Every structure is written in structure tokens, then in C-alpha cells.
Image (tube, grey):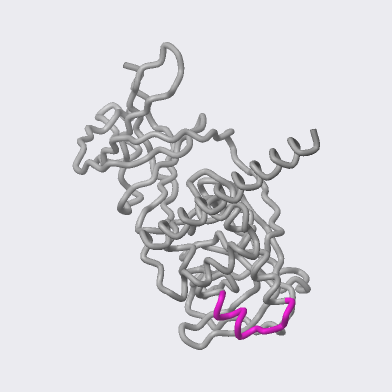
């Protein structure tokens, strides 16, 4: 019986070792396909061996597990006190994240860290000790795995904070929710002018919507229409619908929907004064696809040259 147990243990051990070896081979193939440089390959290999040796493929392909490895690596470098290496690896690991296509949070999903911010996301910030707070408006300039940098949204000089001082932030993600967090100031940047901060994973998420919004992913045809949003007034003084025609057609992706409107990702910006006509197909029984006319509420840039358009219902075609 003892011999049988030993044989089975050896068999399972060999099987596990073969499985892990196959996973590492998969990571090498991914690194080659994504055209990582020799420096990036070495950094990725070190990262995965240190923090995910038994599941390297999962860590190299899934946001959550890659983020855990990055967090552990950067915290370790910071603890060791080698800030030059901390700076260098912040840039190298960010390049790796980008090449692995792990730099963009899927639309509609929440964020867990300031490493998931993107340029030119709007943020508001203030010295944590300032009372009453005078919030300043900024735009995310750059993000790597070591720091994120904020530029001023208007042509003013950035505030002067004490190195290591606490700064409070708040931001609003149109496709998600409001967030608040506190982090520490690092330094001022000269070119381009900006202020740099440490990352944090301690973010408070505050849901604040008039209508409950649900995730709904659907490719859709989007028509950009001419004509005024508010209609025209006839001779009797009554408001009637203005004749509208579609002047541009785009292919977009609906990412969420509520009782008041929806959000759609488009490959180009659209003027705020136009209206949109979108085909919606809800996955419900006895529900056929229908068209809605929408008034644009806000347009926000996203990574990779895309735009998130948040719009309110004006008319629903019930067929």
C-alpha cells in the first residue's frame, strides 16, 4: 500500500511539472507573438517566476492576476529603497502591459487601482490638509507601473505640494461610477509640466445614477442625424418633431443601458448638438430589435482612439 501511494505521488508530481512546463512554453509563445524586446521578455520572465511560478499563463493573460504580480513586484522594489530601479521597472512593466493588451479595462467594469487610469481622463484633486478644500481640475497625462502624472486642465501653474504629502482625488467614469482616493505627491515634472503621484489600490467607489444601469454589450448600427434636438414650432405655436435624416453611419458597441439612456463606444467623436439613432436588441423573450433616438449627454475619449458617448432617450420606435 505504501509503495502504491509513493508511485501515485510521483505520477501526479510528474504530471504537474509537465503541465507547468507547458504553461511556460505558452508564455514564451505569447511574448514572441506580441514582439516583446529582449529586455521585456527578461522582465516578464522574472515577474512571473517570482509571483506566479505555477500559473504563468494565467498571470500573463488575465487582468486580475497580472495586476497582483505587478503590485507585489513594485511594492518589493519600493521596500528595497532602490527608487532608480523602481522608476525603470515602472516603465518597462508598463510597456509589457501594453503589448499584452492588459492596459485597458473593459467598458462597464470597475477599476481597482490608479494603474487603471488612462490619458486624458479628468480628475479633481486637493491637498488633503486643505480646509475648506479648493478642488483643482486636471487631466491624466501619463501612467506607468510606478507613478501617474497629472497635468492642469487649464493654463495655470500646478500647485506646489510637499514631497510625500497626501493629496485627495475624485473622478467620474461615465461608463462606471464615481471614485475617491488619497495618494502621495512625488515630484513636479518640467516637460511637459505636470505633477506626479504614487499609485494606490485603495479606491472608494460611489455609485451615483438617476437610473439603475445594467451592462449590455451589443454591436450596433449608429446613425448620426441632422436637425435640432428640441423640435420646431409650427404656425399654431405647437412643437412638432423636426424632420431628420441620417447623414453619417457608424459601427459602434453599446456597453450599458438604463431607463434613461445608454452608452455606446464609437470609433470617432460626434458633435454634441446632433442626435443619434441606434438599433437596440435586448436579450429578452418576445422582444424584437427596435430603434431609439438619443440626445448626447457627454463624450469622453478612451484609449486606442475610441470615444464613449453617453446619451439620453428622446424617442423609442416600438415598431
Task: Identify the residue at image location x=44%, y=63%.
Answer: 98
Asked whether residue 87 is drawn in magenta, I would say yes
State the image coordinates of residue 259 (x, y, percent, origin top left): 51, 29
Q: Residue furthest right?
A: 2
Q: Is residue 182 above or below residue 30?
A: below
Q: Which is more toward the observer, 21 or 269?
A: 21
For the N terminus, which image quadrant? top right
Q: Residue furthest top?
A: 286
Task: Identify the residue at image location x=62%, y=61%.
Answer: 69
Query: In the shown orientation, is residue 271 left or right of residue 173?
Result: left
Q: Is residue 305 above or below residue 216?
A: below
Query: In the shown orientation, is residue 314 left or right of residue 79?
Result: left
State the image coordinates of residue 213 (x, y, percent, origin top left): 55, 35
Task: Identify the residue at image location x=60%, y=65%.
Answer: 124
Q: Is residue 33 above or below residue 216?
A: below
Q: Which is more toward the observer, 21 or 226?
A: 21
Task: Identify the residue at image location x=55%, y=83%.
Answer: 157
Instruction: For residue 186, say whether it is visible.
Output: yes
For the C terminus, which image quadrant? top left
State the image coordinates of residue 215 (x, y, percent, origin top left): 51, 35
Instruction: For residue 301, say whether it is visible.
Output: no
Asked whether residue 254 is drawn in magenta, I would say no
Q: Which residues are magenta?
A: 79-89
State the image coordinates of residue 4 (x, y, percent, origin top left): 74, 35
Q: How many marks?
A: 0
Q: Is residue 84 above or below residue 262?
A: below
Q: Residue furthest bottom?
A: 190
Query: In the shown orientation, is residue 208 left or right of residue 276?
Result: right
Magenta: predominant secondary structure element? helix
Q: Which is more toward the observer, 120 or 62?
A: 62
Amino acid at each position: 500500500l505504501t509503495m502504491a501511494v509513493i508511485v501515485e505521488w510521483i505520477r501526479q508530481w510528474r504530471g504537474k511539472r509537465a503541465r507547468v512546463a507547458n504553461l511556460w512554453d505558452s508564455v514564451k509563445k505569447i511574448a514572441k507573438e506580441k514582439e516583446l524586446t529582449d529586455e521585456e521578455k527578461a522582465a516578464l520572465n522574472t515577474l512571473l517566476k517570482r509571483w506566479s511560478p505555477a500559473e504563468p499563463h494565467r498571470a500573463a493573460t488575465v487582468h486580475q492576476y497580472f495586476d497582483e504580480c505587478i503590485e507585489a513586484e513594485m511594492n518589493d522594489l519600493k521596500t528595497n529603497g532602490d527608487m532608480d530601479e523602481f522608476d525603470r521597472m515602472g516603465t518597462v512593466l508598463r510597456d509589457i502591459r501594453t503589448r499584452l493588451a492588459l492596459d485597458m479595462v473593459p467598458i462597464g467594469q470597475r477599476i481597482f487601482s490608479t494603474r487603471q487610469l488612462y490619458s486624458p481622463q479628468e480628475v479633481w484633486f486637493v491637498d488633503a490638509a486643505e480646509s475648506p478644500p479648493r478642488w483643482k481640475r486636471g487631466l491624466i497625462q501619463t501612467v506607468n507601473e510606478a507613478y501617474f502624472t497629472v497635468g492642469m486642465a487649464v493654463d495655470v501653474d500646478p500647485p506646489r505640494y510637499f514631497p510625500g504629502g497626501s493629496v485627495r482625488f475624485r473622478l467620474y467614469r461615465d461608463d462606471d461610477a464615481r471614485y475617491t482616493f488619497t495618494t502621495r505627491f512625488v515630484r513636479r515634472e518640467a516637460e511637459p509640466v505636470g505633477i506626479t503621484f504614487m499609485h494606490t489600490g485603495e479606491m472608494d467607489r460611489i455609485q451615483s445614477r438617476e437610473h439603475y444601469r445594467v451592462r449590455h454589450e451589443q454591436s450596433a448600427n449608429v446613425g448620426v442625424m441632422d436637425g435640432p434636438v428640441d423640435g420646431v414650432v409650427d404656425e399654431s405655436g405647437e412643437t412638432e418633431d423636426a424632420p431628420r435624416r441620417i447623414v453619417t453611419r457608424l459601427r459602434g458597441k453599446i456597453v450599458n443601458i438604463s431607463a434613461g439612456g445608454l452608452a455606446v463606444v464609437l470609433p470617432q467623436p460626434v458633435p454634441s448638438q446632433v442626435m443619434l439613432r441606434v438599433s437596440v436588441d435586448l436579450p429578452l423573450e418576445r422582444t424584437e430589435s427596435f430603434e431609439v433616438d438619443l440626445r448626447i449627454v457627454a463624450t469622453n475619449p478612451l484609449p486606442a482612439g475610441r470615444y464613449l458617448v453617453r446619451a439620453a432617450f428622446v424617442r423609442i420606435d416600438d415598431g
